[in-house]
Amino acid sequence: MTDNNIDPHLQSGLYGVPQLHPDEQRKYLGTFRERVSLAMTINEVTAADNMTGFEKELVAHPDYRVLLNGMIDQDSLAPYITLAHQHNVNFTLTSNSEDPAGAEIMGLVIATEKTAINEPVIAINEKYPIVKSEPQQSKKSFFENLFD
């Protein structure tokens, strides 16, 4: 073997096989941002009010795969796994010990297998905003307003 053939082999042996955008893959649970259709942080996964947006995305894209962060408590993941199973959507639990630092650690990602979709909005709170209805205040009668 010549020196030109040995150097890449030694480099991959010492440092591992080179990866394309490893930080992006760690952030999006092993996939690229261009393949992601919906992303939820760990805090959004544990909140119960995001289930409707998740189900809408499953219905819209039944051929996508759900990637779940395996570091989240199983009680929080169980409703998402159940919905994915009900809609016949494949899911994968990923556990990466090298989770990225920061508050934006992904807890759930819905993505394609190999094709890039370049979805402009992937955050669940932007894609499916939660509309909270304010409690209606009872109107005071004429006499209550008169004597206040």
Image (cartoon, rainbow, N blue to C red):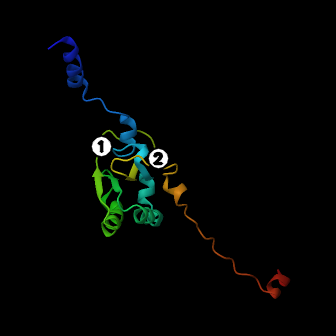
Marked residue nearer the N-terminal end (2 or 1): 1
Up-down relation of residue 21 to residue 117 (above or below)? above
Up-down relation of residue 145 to residue 100 (above or below)? below
* Disc 1: CA contacts within 10 A as few (<14), some (14-19) or many (>=20): some
The quadrant of the image that shows the N terminus is: top left
Q: Amino acid at mark 2?
A: Asn
Asked if residue 17 lies left or right of residue 124, the reply is: left
- From this viewpoint, which residue is outermost toward the left? 1
Up-down relation of residue 32 to residue 56 (above or below)? above
The percent coordinates of residue 140 (x first, y second) are 76, 83
The percent coordinates of residue 100 (x first, y second) are 39, 39
Asked if residue 3 lies left or right of residue 130, the reply is: left
Question: Does residue 39 show up?
Answer: no
The percent coordinates of residue 46 (x first, y second) are 41, 59
Question: Does residue 38 show up?
Answer: yes
Q: CA distance from mark 2 to mark 1?
A: 24 Å
Q: How many marks?
A: 2
Foreground disc of the pair 2, 1: 2
Asked if residue 10 lies left or right of residue 116, the reply is: left
Label at residue 118: 2
The quadrant of the image that shows the C terminus is: bottom right
Up-down relation of residue 67 to residue 1 (above or below)? below
* Disc 2: CA contacts within 10 A as few (<14), some (14-19) or many (>=20): few
Q: Which residue is mark 1?
A: 96
Residue in the picture at 20% in, 20% down = 10
Splitting the image into 4 quarters, where does residue 8 fall? Answer: top left
Residue in the picture at 35% in, 35% down = 22
Asked if residue 35 lies left or right of residue 131, the reply is: left
Circle 2 SS class: loop
Residue in the picture at 20% in, 22% down = 9
Q: Amino acid at mark 1?
A: Asn
